Amino acid sequence: MNSRRAALESLAILGTLAQIAIAAWGLGTLPDSIAVHFGPDGVGYGSKLSLLLLPACGAFTYLVSGFAASSAQPRVNLPMKITITPENRAAVNALKREMVLVTKAALGVGFAAIEWQLVSSARGTLSPGFIPTIVGFSVLVLALTTAYTVAIAKAAKPRPE
C-alpha cells in the first residue's frame, strides 16, 4: 500500500471512529429527548438514539467502499458511458480506485463534522457551524465527484496515433 492510499485509508477510518465516539459521547451526556429538526415552524424533538444513524451510515459506507476499491475493476457508477480498452484500462481503474478512496476519506471526516454539529445542536439551539458544515461538505463531495468523473472521462478517451 503506497503512502497516499495509507493516508486516505487512515483518514477514512479515523473519521468513522470519530463519528462513533461523538455519538457515544452524545448518548452519554444528552437528555433522552433532543432536538432533531430545525425549521421555520420551530424545533422538533426526538430520541437521542437518532445520533446513531449517521455513524451507522458512515460505517456501512466505509465497508462498502472498501469492497468497491479493492476489486480488480473498481465498481464506480459514472453519469456517462466510457469505453474501457486494453490501452486505457490501467489508468481508468487507477482513477476509479483513487476516487473511491478520496470519497471514502471525505465522507468519514465530513460525517464526523456533521455528527459533531448534531450533538452541539441537540439541546435545542442550532450551532452556528451547522449550516456551513453541511454546505461545505456538500460542495466538497460534489467537487470531488465532478473532478474525478472528468479525469476518468479524459483517461478513457482514445488517443490519436
Image (cartoon, helix red, strand yellow):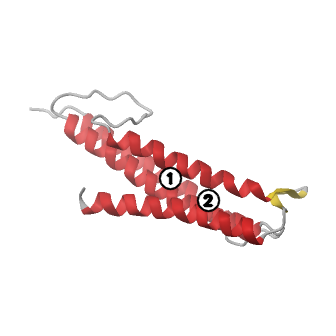
Which kind of residue does numbered mark 1 sit on? Answer: Val
Say whether residue 96 is left or right of residue 31: left
Secondary structure type for disc 1: helix
Between 99 and 20, the one lying in front of the other is: 20
Secondary structure type for disc 2: helix
Q: Residue at x 54, y 56 (%)?
A: 139
Say whether residue 70 is left or right of residue 11: left
Q: Residue at x 53, y 62 (%)?
A: 17
Is residue 136 among the parts visible in the rendering?
no
Say whether residue 152 is left or right of residue 110: left
Work out whether 78 lies above or below 137: above
**Callout 1 crowding tier (Cα within 10 Å): few <14, some 14–19, many ≥20:** some
Residue 112 position in % (x across, y down): 58, 63
- Residue 123 falls in which quadrant of the image? bottom right
Q: How many marks?
A: 2
Which kind of residue does numbered mark 2 sit on? Answer: Val
Residue 85 position in % (x across, y down): 20, 28
**Callout 2 crowding tier (Cα within 10 Å): few <14, some 14–19, many ≥20:** few
What residue did someone put label 1 on?
141
In space, the residues marked 1 and 2 are separated at their CA atoms by 10 Å
Q: Residue at x 51, y 58 (%)?
A: 108
In the rendered structure, which disc, 1 or 2, sits on the residue that comes first in sequence?
2
Residue 125 position in % (x across, y down): 82, 70
- Residue extending furthest front? 28
Is residue 24 among the parts visible in the rendering?
yes
Image mark for residue 135: 2
Between 150 and 102, the one lying in front of the other is: 102
Q: Quadrant of the C terminus?
A: top left
Between 56 and 112, the one lying in front of the other is: 56
